[in-house]
Image: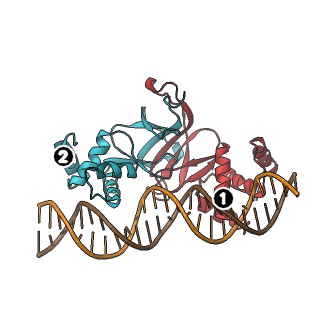
Chain colours: A cyan, B red, C brown, D orange
DNA sequence: GTCTATGCAAAGCTTTTGCAGGAGA
DNA sequence: TCTCCTGCAAAAGCTTTGCATAGAC
């Protein structure tokens, strides 16, 4: 089920993350399935093949990957986080009906107002919500 | 403490919201103080003058105002919501150190990719996080 | 053998729900 | 009187913490 185990191992190593099996699987899942899952979805999917997996470990792993800038946590006015492997910049469209989050290619450059000069931008997110074309019929 | 009680009463009436004292005060607080407070901050501030206020009522009121499109709930990778009175479109910059959220004037227009044609956009948010110039020294 | 990863159970927090009392029309 | 606003208490749901065990080097 792991697309390119070697490749992912290298990515983790580069960030000083020991490539344990679970870490590889979590990152692989986010890397392949671009579905912006919540913790529970990740947990349930991986549990099928890793029966001993615990949700705590999923949380731990996601925190680690997020701290190392391999994964982004996003929250679109919900009480739960969604996760994705970081790739190039893009925005997100969340359908309020089916709860799917779609990627939107876009220019994420932003110019801060001059009174905020000297600020450091670490992360940028463009979030759009509404009803997707599949549900809007 | 209420800037323009009559004005706010009119705004609420226009949206079919009965202008109870608490509703006026909650909306007035968001309308004047552009600090993007969380529920607890709203609750504590208003409690000083409304000692019997309960947090449930703050939640109820915010939900009502949000449903009626007078207030926007935003969440920048946190476990708690922040609220603001809806004005013209703008983005938000959240300082990870002092937790302040600043408004950023910007063009919020966005073009959906063609495979998403037919979708309806209800809401758009541009969220940037990092360290503000006050903390970044 | 030591250090780190994993996982269970419990705690912590924000938000929601159920329901009863109270205010306003 | 009748509606619905308010608020207490409890529940719910996501996430974090503490600690013990398992596993890797």
Asked if one can make out residue A11 in the rendered structure from this viewpoint, the answer is yes
**Residues under labels 1 and 2: Cα distance?**
49 Å
Mark in front: 1 vs 2: 1
Chain under numbered label 1? B
Q: Residues within 10 Å of mark 2 (few under 14, many from 20)?
A: some
Q: Is residue C6 left or right of residue A111?
A: left
Q: Toward which corner of the image does residue C3 lie, by quadrant?
A: bottom left
- Residue drawn at x 29%, y 50% is A48
The one of C9 and B116 positioned closer to us in this rendering: C9
Describe the element under mark 2 as helix, strand or loop.
helix
Asked if one can make out residue A109 in the rendered structure from this viewpoint, the answer is no
Where B111 falls versus A84 (above or below)? above
**Residue A4 image position (x, y, % from top left):** 19, 40
Mark carried by residue A129: none
Task: Please name the residue that numbered disc 1 is placed on.
Answer: B58
Q: Toward which corner of the image does residue A102 lie, by quadrant?
A: top left
**Residue B110 image position (x, y, % from top left):** 51, 30
The one of B49 and A23 positioned closer to us in this rendering: A23
**Residue A6 image position (x, y, % from top left):** 16, 44
Mark carried by residue A10: 2
- Residue drawn at x 76%, y 56% is B2
């Amino acid at each position: 089920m792991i697309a390119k185990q070697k490749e992912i191992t290298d990515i983790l190593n580069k960030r000083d993350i020991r490539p344990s099996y679970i870490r590889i699987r979590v990152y692989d899942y986010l890397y392949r399935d671009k579905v912006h899952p919540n913790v529970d979805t990740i947990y349930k999917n991986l549990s099928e093949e890793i029966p001993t997996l615990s949700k705590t470990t999923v949380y731990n792993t996601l925190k680690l990957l997020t701290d190392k800038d391999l994964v982004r946590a996003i929250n679109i006015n919900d009480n739960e986080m969604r996760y994705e492997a970081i790739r190039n910049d893009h925005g997100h469209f969340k359908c309020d009906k089916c709860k799917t989050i779609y990627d939107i290619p876009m220019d994420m450059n932003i110019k801060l107002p001059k009174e905020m000069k000297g600020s450091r931008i670490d992360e940028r997110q463009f979030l759009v919500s509404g009803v997707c074309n599949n549900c809007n019929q």
